[in-house]
Amino acid sequence: MSKTYYDPADLRKFGNITEWNEELGNRFFDYYGKVFEEGALSAREKSLIALAVAHTEQCPYCIDAYTKDGLQRGVTKEEMMEAIHVGAAIKSGATLVHGVQMMNKVNKLEM
Amino acid sequence: MATKSLLARNNDIANTARQLDILSNGIFASGELPTFVTKIKETNQFPLRPKKLEILQINLGYMCNQVCEHCHVDAGPDRKEIMTLETMNQCLEVIQKTAAHTLDLTGGAPEMNPNFRWFVEEASKIGVKDFIVRSNLTIIRANKKYHDLPEFFKKHNVHIVSSMPHWTRGKTDKQRGNGVFDKSIEALRMLNKVGYGIENSELKLDLVYNPSGAFLPGDQNALENDFKKALKNDFNIDFHSLFAITNLPISRFLDYLIASENYEDYMISLVEAYNPSAVANVMCTNTLSVSWEGWLYDCDFNQMLNLKVASKVKHISTYNEEIIQNRNIIINQHCYGCTAGAGSSCQGVVA
């Protein structure tokens, strides 16, 4: 067993998950591929969304993959950083909006 | 930012035998990755053979006003190797009898060869209609004596193909040198002004995109759309097509890959993106490359690796098309660069 939880070389083995369940694995990869095709959103826009979500999910494989994918599409550093700020803003907003719940509870419990 | 060639810096990678040693060993010798020969044997495409000769690509010299980080020629102001009149005359003799319809002039900056214009004029006189000049754009702005190049190109209906790694200043200057982006924009404006790159104009202006780092080019059409939109909106510049070219792991780009510890991952990316249908149309099957000294090569990359054609005829002075076309193309692991994804050539994607 590897002594660390994450190995960058494992990303290339992602496809191997089909070996232990071919049907579900293949369905997932078909779906995944379809999602990222050019559609109402461009493949470039989807790549930036994926980069932001990769950060909020804190998935190191996804961060490597979509940083490289962005570079290949000519996405600039500025665009990448703005995209992950969007993810970060939603993350922090999601934390802070629960502050209203805290305030409600305090108001209910306090005399 | 480098200002000298690898050669002038006495860098180990300037030695072509050293480059071939790197490409032949390591992850390819250990069997971790298949060699290019093994790979094309899978689809019975070995040995690789030339098809009809269409393009004669002549390298007029390694001298250049720029020192780009990724340059596979290791070109720069300190490179003094340029084609002599004698060799040019030998080329003209061949141009008269070749079946190739296109003359593709490259370098370095081909315009820096003092006999560049004479050569184009002579080739034009003997009937060449289809000229390509691989111009780095900044040369047009580098010195007063080059300011009228757009007019000269127009006069001979030269098809201009120019490098532009990105539509933003930062990314362009990082790869090609400080100030290159602004000068390139000025040069593109001059070319547009005389009619180059305008919709439906016969004066062809194409741009070449190659990635500024250890990653492969994205979809050529999508990149073309992004380039067109940005150059039009930001600078009111027009061009015809964008060619997306993959960086091959040789010379300065190889040096960069090794120094940045990206070499193995880059080679893995190239092998993973291998596309057997791109093999059928790689440019070495329809192009012949001629060096500043008149030596013949399967492509510009093999020229830079000093891999002369595997033929009895190796020099322009003893040119015989029938003999040359009956040869096997020399391949090595750098060839994966031309077969990745949609493939890559001096004319962009091939598959």
Image (cartoon, rainbow, N blue to C red):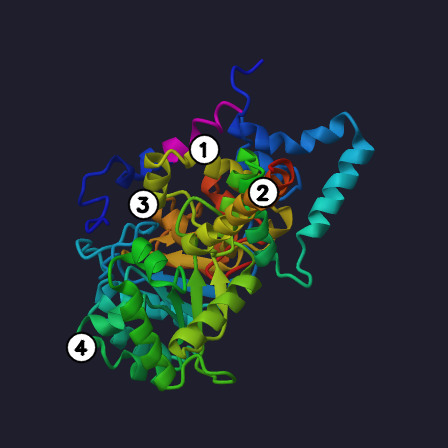
Name the amino acid, label 2: Met
| Residue sitting at x 19%, y 51% | B3
Tell me, for residue B252, which label it has, or none: 3
Structural crowding at the residue carrying mark 3, measured as other residues with C-alpha within 10 Å and reported as few (<14), some (14–19) or many (≥20): many
The quadrant in which residue B16 appears is top left
Label annotation for residue B264:
1
Chain of the residue that carries numbered disc 4 in the rendered image: B
Inter-mark Cα distance, 4 to 3: 29 Å
Residue B34, located in which quarter of the rendered image? Answer: top right
Q: Identify which residue is drawn at 43% across, 67% down.
A: B207
Give the labeled residue for mark 2. Answer: A103
Is the residue under label 3 in contact with that under label 4 (CB below 8 Å)?
Answer: no
Magenta residues span B20-31
Q: Quadrant of residue B9?
A: top left
A36 shown above or below B242: above
Dot 1 lies on which element? Answer: helix
Q: Are marks 1 and 2 on the same chain?
A: no
Label 3's element? helix
Q: Which residue is mark 4?
A: B145
Distance between the Cα atoms at labels 4 and 1? 44 Å
Q: Provide the secondary structure element on which disc 2 rests.
A: helix
- Distance between mark 1 and mark 2 Cα atoms: 55 Å
